[in-house]
Image: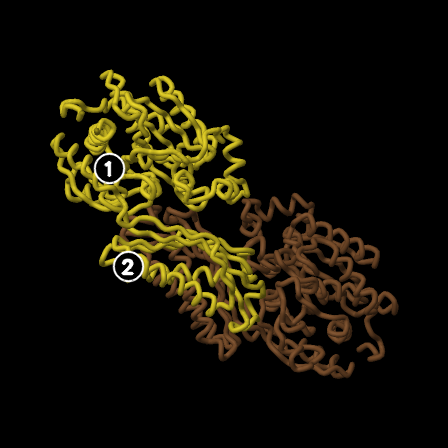
Chain colours: A yellow, B brown
Amino acid sequence: MPLSPEIRADLGRFLSTVEASSGIGQGRPDGLSRLTLSDSDREIRDLFVRWCTEAGLQVSVDGMGSIFARREGSEDLPPVLVGSHLDTQVNGGRFDGVIGVFGALELVRRLNDLGITTRRPIEIVNWTNEEGARYSPPMVASGCFVGAHPVEWAHGLRDEDGVSIGEALDAIGYRGAAPVGGREIDSYYELHIEQADQLDRTGHQVGIVTHGYRSHGIRVEFRGETGHTGPLPMERRRNALMAGARLLVAVDDIGWEHAATGGKATGARLTASPNKAGILSDLAEAVCDVRHERPEIADAMRDRMLQAIQAACERTGCEATILDTWSWGGDIFDRELIATVREAAAALGYRAAELPSQAGHDAYFLAQRFPATMIFTPCKDGITHNNHELATPAMIEPGLNVLLHAVVARADRR
Amino acid sequence: MPLSPEIRADLGRFLSTVEASSGIGQGRPDGLSRLTLSDSDREIRDLFVRWCTEAGLQVSVDGMGSIFARREGSEDLPPVLVGSHLDTQVNGGRFDGVIGVFGALELVRRLNDLGITTRRPIEIVNWTNEEGARYSPPMVASGCFVGAHPVEWAHGLRDEDGVSIGEALDAIGYRGAAPVGGREIDSYYELHIEQADQLDRTGHQVGIVTHGYRSHGIRVEFRGETGHTGPLPMERRRNALMAGARLLVAVDDIGWEHAATGGKATGARLTASPNKAGILSDLAEAVCDVRHERPEIADAMRDRMLQAIQAACERTGCEATILDTWSWGGDIFDRELIATVREAAAALGYRAAELPSQAGHDAYFLAQRFPATMIFTPCKDGITHNNHELATPAMIEPGLNVLLHAVVARADRR
């Protein structure tokens, strides 16, 4: 049965977990630089596992290092999964991902306080490598969980130093014994900061996330030929760095063309070799993506991005190989789950807005196989992936309580 | 007095020095990767010094690590300086620079064979960091030699790993006691592969280098702000990587506009930070240059390049700082020295062409203060800064002999 509206999360207890997290893997002032499977990631994982164990939860780690902490229900039914991620960008904030994991922890601690056993089990999850900052593609562990990626392939992904995910899991002791996915999940809820400014700008307290922007990403390699930057005639050059730069600019132009309707496109990463003064590069690698709320426009932007790869090759005499592609979003979240969020927000008296998610989230992969949805807190000025990212306690509290009430309603449903 | 035309360099002896060099700092097949002041640079320097000592030359090393090997003349006059560089690009060839240093060594060995003492001393030189592959700007030691750069400033330049030139000189034991420049030089000759295909294409055996392309280079830093590659609206983004990519593409476009008249422009290097998927970069650094045979066109191309920095900033919301600029070339070589080369080629019966240098060379800096010129050998298909760079013995022999005869004529002049 639904919780009484007077029941609220313990905000202070929740904030103490965020505060502890803010001290692990510190980056620039007020920010975090806690790359997935790093030593600081191990530290926050160890702390999270300890807290879960102290809360009486049964902890397991799967072969991708994702951590599950289970609170049994009164019936033998598939669990409601609730969580997010504890890894951050190189210049990340203190709230992105973190509040979703510790919001779920506060939820079960509150149920413990009240001695409430839900009908279905509730499981907290911390997904490995959501950010994609160390390993491309992002959200790789939730992708494996739903069978979108083979686990063997994911283990072989390498960071810039050549360290594979498999090796990094072993290094921090988080290659777990639990199978990756392959089991029934009742539903998935994820509390997250909005990472855009719609809630903050309009004064809404909580976001009911109805769908996700459709996003298409690529990682592409260009091959050319070294040569002298001086005498070699323009028409004989095969500068792979220039092919990459031309792709990045073309992708940015695609974003600007769709800016008026909220479209975005990004050249996020470009590396080249030798990448030195005096010599043309014979190898370059670029990471780009395009995003739009309307899937058909996002798909058209992707087609333009792919054409831009060809145009960059034709202009520079290079050859391209697409190394990775990823897509997510679209009309993905579950109507029944969205209704539980809407009802909880209404019962608790919060000003709620229905809105899309613009960023990528593990919830997108979960939604491929299970009912899933998200709850957004406001995010100051929409600033994120930046040490100035800010969600004040007052900005988080409504989402935290909506998560508690929506999840319990779902877990208890007949 | 001029040497008799029958006197020729010992091609076999010269080739043995190039062959020894080709085994030190090997890179890709048939190529070299012998960055300045590296361990392999030390190895070739040590070998060069040993050969010079065995040839009875007096070796000194200046504060920039440039090596001078002096053969006294019969009179106390400023020396004729002859040389080039032994450092290479990351994917460099076996001939670029190398034949100029060992061509000078063969010259003095031949004079030793013949027991000839020239009127003026002859000094061989190996300049530090001609390539600019490890330290920007290129030709930094010859620039210091003529007073174009302060030595203290050059010692403080750092490579990608943060190692300064001063530290690197100490590490390989080549921070010499000799003052950097500050002395009279009669003249400077440099034998070099053409690095373009004009001689190879037209069947000329030797190049009389009359002037250099005018070249302008910049190293520029862009500063932006990190942020999420997804939700952040296009108009709020300040992606420093995109500013760099836009500059590179604009510079490439400038090159294409002038391609019909032999102009070139290059985006050679672009780095960014964090430069990762999912996050906008707040820092980027680009190295670009423009070149044209006509100085006024090269200057106009430079102005366009500087405007492109501003345009990139305006489009991306970033700020730019120009960290370095360098310029060289123009109508620089000495008419009298050019005449000695022309006369030597004619006396030896070679098919010679008068042509400009398109690449940068230490000779440009020497020409700022002293009479200077260059002699080019053909270069197969103009391929250079590439392991497939090739100048066969038959392609080098004419230039080697012209160097011998022109330098002796100059050294002996009344």
Q: Position of residue A239 (x, y in %)?
A: 52, 64
Tell me the residue at 44%/66% (across/down): A310
Q: Position of residue A283 (x, y in %)?
A: 54, 58
Q: Residue at x 77, y 63 (%)?
A: B105
> For the C terminus of chain B, which image quadrant?
bottom right
Task: Work out whether A147 lies above or below A252.
Answer: above
Per the rendering, the mark at residue B21 is none
User: What residue does disc 1 label?
Assistant: A375
Q: Say which of B156 and A19 sits in front.
A: A19
Dot 2 alpha-carbon crowd within 10 angstroms: few under 14, some 14 to 19, many 20 or more: some
> Is A72 above or below relative to A138?
above
Element at label 1:
strand
- Give percent across and percent down for residue B211: 59, 75
- Residue A4 position by quadrant: top left
Q: With B55 as the anchor, is A359 left or right in this view? A: left
Q: 10 Å neighbourhood of mark 1: few (<14), some, or many (≥20)? A: many
Residue on which disc 2 sits: A297
Question: Residue B354 vs residue A328: left or right?
Answer: right
